[in-house]
Image: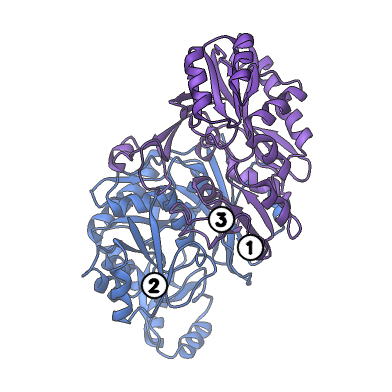
Chain colours: A blue, B purple
């Protein structure tokens, strides 16, 4: 079985490494080669709107999947003529735009922070009426790792920013005074089988995931059933196949959806070392219709990202108990270069 | 860091997959391409006595290691001029010939089955005096997975075989009425650090490893200290760097050395799923002088080889708890195609 992956970053790398255990082989399609994957799988360079390139790639594989959420949904639709492509294109369409994503949650009666579309100062003033300051102003598209979002403390700052962004489509969100952030990862097989990993507690720094603890401490049945319920509604609505993550705020025992990622997710990297089956392996099993693997934890895992610069490996490995993952990316401030996971009983 | 591997079979594949986690990259050198590795690392095709090919390979990597014990020791010696090559060439020289291997054990006062060199009918008759029938007759070189060895029940059969093999250098071994077979895997870092995996109980069928249970049941301190003692003596004598396996017979509480493998070993494949650090990762850490990873077990593992034909994956994966490893090799009777491991608390 040959799997085509749209995107060649670290998530593709980890899919290749985990899928190779199962005897799968891989092809990568992206606009530019990535150091993370270029030695591990044949690389097809092409634009996501180049139908000839997409067609020839699709015909070289048995199924296509995606490692980055900003893939043009049209590219997924297009290759679906030739081979199955999972997750479904509508999952990307729904989650690429913060407004349609929030509207999806709203339609599914999944609570969220208050939100409103903003493309003008007038709309900003309406939002101000509803939410007051401080509020969040975010680009609707292409934000990640805290990029493209601002915390606005007063009207003058808001007006200046809306003016500066020149009518770009934005979204305001009320600031949720959350007790903590959680994440749930779901695996939905094309056979219909579903499984969920335990909720993870996440801590972000400057908008980038810093630490994930799994299973999250102080989990209650009520929290788990809310999270699983939300994830099930999303999976049903999107006819989802594969792994996705739903990021959540916990506020006084109530879970609010923050955003979803229609792909394997950084908050699930601990599963490489701390779970019977990793999220990467289960994503591949899901899109191939193979039975899903157990999502049981091997203990309590703490995963920490390596961001910007890579500490000396001799130091990181000194304890003997740490699992190190190096994505082989060029160091760059704010860039995720790898992660370490410790698993304790 | 770029690692060159002599040999491109499943052990190289598993080294590549495990080492890639650490951010290492790989090059393979072998006489013919192997399906197991050809998609995962650049392949250098060449003969092991082609110095120009060896030189150019060595110069493309930072360190060379070996995944098959029958590598010509001269090839290791040769590339050592350019880059470090581990394990040391003398480990291959010692273990490639069943006679020198047994003599090594004897020199280190490690008990073994009775043995004698046999290259003629006269020598067979001498061995018959010492050991009686049945006895084992084995080729001294290039035997593996039960190939090149025969159980001889009487003189006529022995004479016929010696005559048929036409003066080839053989070894006779007395048959040990062992209680069970065990294996110990040692990791010896180039920094001097050493660690041992728990003893594994192995069961062979038709000379091929069938099942490994780790840690072996009914281990005693006396057994472990014998095994570790033998392994330490071998490591000292050979100035060993890397992972090696020592296969043992247990006979009434006494351990006899059967053979050693100067490489990662099938009896350690369970460590991929059942140990904090796999033998593959520790081999790479050892040859790079990185701190060794914990060899603590995550529970009791049972590893079973997939030999000859591959059962349908849907069936193998049905339990959700099984870890499947497919080496992507062409099916062939008696060929190891993959393995599965179950880990229980």
Q: Secondary structure at mark 3?
A: helix
Q: Which mark is residue A176?
A: none
Work out how far the residue at label 3 is from the one at label 1, CA to CA, in angstroms.
Answer: 19 Å
User: Which residue is the extreme one toward the left?
Assistant: A81
Locate residue B211: give its quadrant.
top left
Q: Which residue is mark 1?
A: B57
- Residue A32 visible? The answer is yes
Q: Chain of mark 3?
A: B
Going from N to C along the chain, the mark reached first, 3 or 1, is 3
Q: Residues within 10 Å of mark 1 (few under 14, many from 20)?
A: many
Is there a contact, CB below 8 Å, between mark 2 and mark 1?
A: no
Q: Residues within 10 Å of mark 2 (few under 14, many from 20)?
A: some
- Residue B202 visible? The answer is no
Q: Which residue is mark 2?
A: A70
Locate residue A334: give its quadrant.
bottom right
Work out how far the residue at label 2 is from the one at label 1, CA to CA, in angstroms.
Answer: 40 Å
Q: Which residue is mark 3?
A: B20
Q: Nearer the viewer, mark 3 or mark 1?
A: 1
| Image coordinates for residue A328, horizontal then vertical, percent | 59, 64
Horizontal placement of B186 versus A197: left or right?
A: right
| Image coordinates for residue B166, horizontal then vertical, percent | 54, 31
Q: Nearer the viewer, residue A194 or A278?
A: A278
Position of B201 relative to A131 (above/below): above
Q: Secondary structure at mark 1?
A: helix
Position of B335 relative to B64 (above/below): above
Quarter of the picture containing the C terminus of chain A is top right
Horizontal placement of B186 versus A200: left or right?
A: right
Work out how far the residue at label 3 is from the one at label 2, CA to CA, in angstroms.
Answer: 26 Å
Q: Nearer the viewer, residue B167 or A230?
A: B167
Tags 3 and 1 both on a single chain: yes
Question: Residue shown at 63%/37% (left/top)?
Answer: B96
Position of B113 relative to A22 (above/below): above
């Amino acid at each position: 079985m040959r799997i085509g992956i749209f995107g060649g970053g670290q998530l593709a790398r980890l899919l290749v490494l985990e899928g190779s255990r199962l005897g799968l082989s891989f092809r990568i399609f992206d606009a530019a080669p990535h150091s993370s994957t270029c030695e591990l799988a044949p690389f097809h360079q092409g634009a996501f709107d180049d139908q000839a390139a997409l067609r020839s790639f699709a015909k070289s594989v048995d199924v296509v999947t995606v490692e980055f959420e900003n893939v043009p949904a049209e590219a997924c639709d297009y290759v679906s003529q030739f081979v199955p492509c999972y997750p479904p294109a509508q999952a990307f369409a729904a989650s690429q735009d913060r407004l349609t994503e929030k509207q999806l949650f709203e339609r599914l009666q999944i609570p969220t922070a208050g939100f409103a579309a903003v493309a003008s100062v007038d709309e900003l003033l309406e939002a101000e009426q509803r939410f007051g300051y401080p509020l969040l102003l975010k680009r609707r598209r292409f934000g990640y790792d805290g990029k493209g979002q601002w915390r606005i403390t007063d009207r003058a700052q808001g007006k200046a920013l809306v003016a500066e962004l020149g009518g770009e489509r934005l979204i305001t969100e009320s600031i949720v005074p959350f007790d903590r952030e959680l994440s749930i990862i779901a695996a939905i097989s094309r056979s219909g089988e579903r499984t969920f990993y335990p909720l993870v507690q996440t801590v972000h720094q400057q908008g980038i995931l810093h630490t994930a603890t799994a299973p999250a401490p102080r989990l209650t049945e009520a929290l788990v059933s809310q999270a699983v319920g939300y994830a099930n509604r999303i999976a049903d609505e999107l006819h989802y196949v594969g792994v996705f993550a739903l990021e959540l705020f916990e506020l006084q025992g109530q879970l609010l959806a923050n955003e979803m990622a229609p792909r394997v997710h950084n908050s699930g990297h601990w599963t490489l070392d701390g779970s019977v089956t990793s999220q990467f392996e289960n994503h591949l099993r899901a899109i191939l219709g193979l039975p899903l693997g157990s999502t049981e934890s091997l203990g309590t895992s703490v995963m920490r990202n390596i961001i910007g610069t890579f500490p000396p490996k001799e130091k990181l490995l000194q304890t003997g108990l740490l699992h190190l993952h190096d994505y082989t990316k060029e160091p760059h401030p704010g860039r995720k270069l790898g992660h370490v996971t410790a698993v304790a009983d």
